[in-house]
Amino acid sequence: MATLTALIRKSLGLPWVRLALGLGLGGAIAPFPALAESLPLVPPPTEAAPVPQGEPQTVPLTLSDLLTLTLEGNRDLRNRVLDRTVERQTLAAAEQTFDPRFTPTLEVNATLTEFGGVEGSESELGAVLLGGRTDFDQRVLLNTNLVTRLGTDIVLGLTPLEGGQLFQFRVSQPLLRGFGAAINEAPVNQARLGEISNQLALRQTVIDTLTTAIVGYNDLVNAQAQVEIQTQALARRQRQLEIVQALVQAGRRAPIDLFDPERSLADAEGSLVNAQNQLDQANNTLLNLIGTDRNLRFVVSLDAVRELYAIAAEEVLAYQPEALVAVALAQRTDYRQAQLQQQQQALDLLIAQDELRWQLNAVADGTLGDSSVGVLGLVATRVFGDPDPETNRVASEIALQQQDNTLAQLQNEIRNDAIARLAEARSNLQQVEAAERATLNARRQVDADQARGGRDLFEAISQEESLVTAQTNELAARIAFLNSVARLDQTVGITLERWVGEINLSPELQE
């Protein structure tokens, strides 16, 4: 049977944009968990049976399949990847700041000379009547401009079609404001920092998208398991009603005893319909996430779910809070972006301080040709009474101090969030264990009542409803644990590292 990835790719009929998640990824961590062994899930079909027209095609779906399809097909993510083309071009333009600029110019002029009040021969008079004489001349200019990293501004000009003065030059070297590589390279360095920040922003977009996919997969697991729970409950209540009906027909029960089993059966039917609707919605959410309109019905794999859940539970118990905080401070994109912003604002302050200095330039100006002229001089300039330079300096200093406070606050928040997310995951794991015991106890009560022949009808119905409630609560606890692990990975910033060995990546994002 064709894989799900190939099936959906084929449905679009277009090449997919596959995303790659570079940005310094480490080694692969164990895959993300899904659901535990005790949940009653429907295993995927071994072969794809012919699907009637209009009916959804049932296909197996693992979490790694879903994440790969999401990276390839999610439209928002693909648009974000396209944005990177513009961002990289912006950096390339900034990197060319110190490259020479050539400006060739071709100039063609037409000069019309009119004649008036001129006496002459008949031929000359004809020229006057025709409007005079038109002269054409052309000029070619070749200009080159270069700004060095020290701030030197060099302008060279060449007029090859003219005699006499053929070559002009002008060199201006700042001695105070604008002098030095640090100040002249500041805009380029800011563009580089901005590019790194853009890479981190894309990384965060991918992390958020994958987290959404993981939660959506958990919702599918939840809905599918809930359908199975309600299906089993409906079957048990149907058997219970059939037993009571037989007893009523035999005269061993009064007809009024049918009311409670019939009501319980109707409740189970309504619950099953609601569970099936939730399954449809969860399935539709995933179809929208991966960007396809194929009529597919996803089914999770029971064995894969068991393995993933067990690995997650083991890892959560093994995490050390302080080590997790250290990883978060190294991996969180918002913290790394804040550090980059701090560096950018330091460059803003450097530029603002430079603007307060005198403009003192050494200038060399001259022409070379039949007669050469050269001029050397100093040009000093300063605007008095303009408050903007000082205002910009103060604003830059304040912004840098505020960014220091932001970094400190963000560091505290990351520490608190990482520890809180870990505590939440461990708490949810404990709730799963408690819910398991409650389900086991409810099932034992139902089995014991069936062994006794179900003499107390009301108690049997109550125990059956208690079993369904316990199973539902256990399922909810497991899904809450799975979602808390996904949020923990997102909070620490290791979602990509966890899945880098399990999903298909391409060089598109390996920067």
Image (cartoon, rainbow, N blue to C red):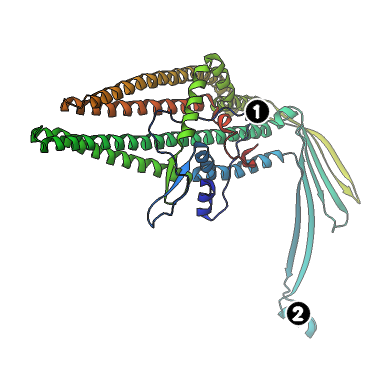
State the image coordinates of residue 443 (x, y, percent, origin top left). Answer: 30, 25
Which amino acid type is shown beneath numbered disc 2? Ala
State the image coordinates of residue 509 (x, y, percent, origin top left). Answer: 62, 39
Q: Which of these two is toward me, 40 or 193?
A: 40
State the image coordinates of residue 170 (x, y, percent, origin top left). Answer: 80, 41
Say if 158 sits above or below 488 in the image.
below
The label on residue 351 is 1
Q: Residue, x 74% and y 78% (percent of image)?
A: 128
State the image coordinates of residue 346 (x, y, percent, origin top left). Answer: 62, 24
Which amino acid type is shown beneath numbered disc 1? Ile
Q: Quadrant of the C terminus?
A: top right
Give the residue number, with chain letter if any, for mark 2.
Answer: 127
Query: Hey, which quadrant is residue 445 in on the image?
Result: top left
Q: Tags 1 and 2 in contact by the CB under 8 Å rule? A: no
Say what secondary structure mark 1 lies in. Answer: helix
User: Counting residues from the N terminus, which is met first, the one under dot 1 or under dot 2?
Assistant: 2
| Label 2: few (<14), some (14–19) or many (≥20) C-alpha neighbours in 10 Å | some
Total marks placed: 2
Q: Which of these two is toward me, 132 or 151?
A: 151
Residue 397 visible in image: no
Say if 477 sits above or below 160 in the image.
above
**What is the distance, in whole Å, between disc 1 and disc 2 at their CAs?**
65 Å
Q: Which of these two is toward me, 135 or 50?
A: 50
Residue that extends furthest to the right in the rendered view of this protein: 370
